[in-house]
């Protein structure tokens, strides 16, 4: 309230690990610049008039509410060098969409809480990412399984989902950086889907595979030791 009354809108800090917190009584758009250091911005409103520059090192946008939250890609428009979004305090549903703005902000680490959360990457999102979704039946949509991307689904049943109607191939090494991701959903595909399950799929706990209407193939190597549920929809499919 006092900062609002004083019309305090611009904060600049130095090279330490700094923290800037906005209470619910702070109602102004702000310009925040934190220089070097692993800085944390707590409960900062991502209004169109607020600008955040995290500076050097890894900086975090953190929210402490236990309620649900939605972050569309445009919410990250005025962020620069903010690498992490922490919504792990939430016990409600969290939805995050990563696109061009998230990519330009440098946002690569997302942590959600206990709800049934969804993280979606658009084709405009070009960064490797580290995604951790805590408890809940979470869905990770169109996430690129690059060698630099890590996904931890946490507790409950979590799904890696792809919405393209095109053909797709998943080799076992694609699952190397997955932890506690139990399901792969490629049911939107009308093309040919090929999935190979081996050591990495087993380590990821991947047990449920859904494919679409194409002529699909699911192969289990001798290294795949889990009991699985396979659903291949229409098409002349091969197991």
Image: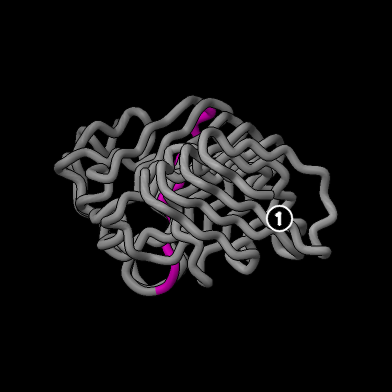
Q: Viewer-proximal residue, 167 or 16? A: 167
Q: What stretch is highlighted in magenta?
A: 57-66
Q: Main secondary structure of the magenta part?
A: loop
Q: Position of residue 142 (x, y in %)?
A: 42, 49
- Residue at 30% of width from left, 39% of height from top? 72
Q: Name the residue under label 1.
A: 204
Q: Viewer-proximal residue, 130 or 121? A: 121
Q: Viewer-proximal residue, 62 or 125? A: 125
- Residue at 37% of width from left, 44% of height from top? 165
Determine if residue 21 is in view. Answer: no
Q: Quadrant of the N terminus?
A: top left
* Quarter where residue 136 is shown: top right
Crowd around label 1: few <14 · some 14–19 · many ≥20 (10 Å) = many
Q: Position of residue 113 (x, y in %)?
A: 58, 37
The local secondary structure at tag 1 comes to loop
Residue 61 lies in magenta, yes or no? yes
Instruction: Please state if 113 lies on the left or on the right of 98 as rendered.
Output: right
- Residue at 24% of width from left, 31% of height from top? 27
Instruction: Please state if 230 lies on the left or on the right of 217 as rendered.
Output: right
Compared with residue 125, is residue 235 higher up or lower down, i.e. above or below?
above
Residue 9 lies in magenta, yes or no? no
Q: Position of residue 83 (x, y in %)?
A: 40, 61
Instruction: Please state if 197 lies on the left or on the right of 38 as rendered.
Output: right
């Amino acid at each position: 309230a006092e900062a609002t009354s004083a019309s305090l809108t611009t904060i600049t800090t130095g090279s330490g690990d700094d923290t800037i917190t906005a209470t619910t009584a702070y109602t102004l758009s702000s310009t925040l610049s934190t220089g070097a250091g692993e800085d944390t911005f707590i409960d900062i409103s991502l209004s169109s008039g607020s600008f955040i520059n995290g500076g050097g090192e890894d900086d975090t946008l953190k929210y402490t509410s236990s309620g649900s939250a939605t972050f569309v890609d445009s919410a990250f428009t005025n962020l620069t060098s903010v690498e992490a979004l922490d919504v792990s305090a939430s016990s409600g549903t969290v939805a995050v969409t990563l696109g061009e703005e998230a990519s330009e902000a440098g946002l690569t680490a997302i942590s959600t809480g206990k709800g049934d959360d969804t993280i979606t990457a658009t084709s405009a999102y070009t960064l490797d990412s580290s995604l951790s979704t805590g408890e809940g039946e979470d869905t990770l949509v169109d996430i690129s399984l690059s060698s630099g991307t890590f996904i931890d689904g946490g507790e409950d049943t979590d799904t890696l989902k792809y919405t393209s109607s095109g053909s797709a191939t998943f080799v076992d090494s694609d699952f190397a950086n997955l932890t506690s991701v139990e399901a792969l959903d490629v049911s939107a595909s009308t093309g040919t889907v090929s999935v190979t399950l081996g050591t990495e799929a087993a380590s990821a706990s991947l047990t449920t595979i859904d494919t679409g209407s194409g002529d699909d193939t699911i192969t289990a190597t001798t290294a795949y030791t889990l009991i699985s549920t396979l659903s291949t929809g229409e098409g002349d499919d091969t197991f």
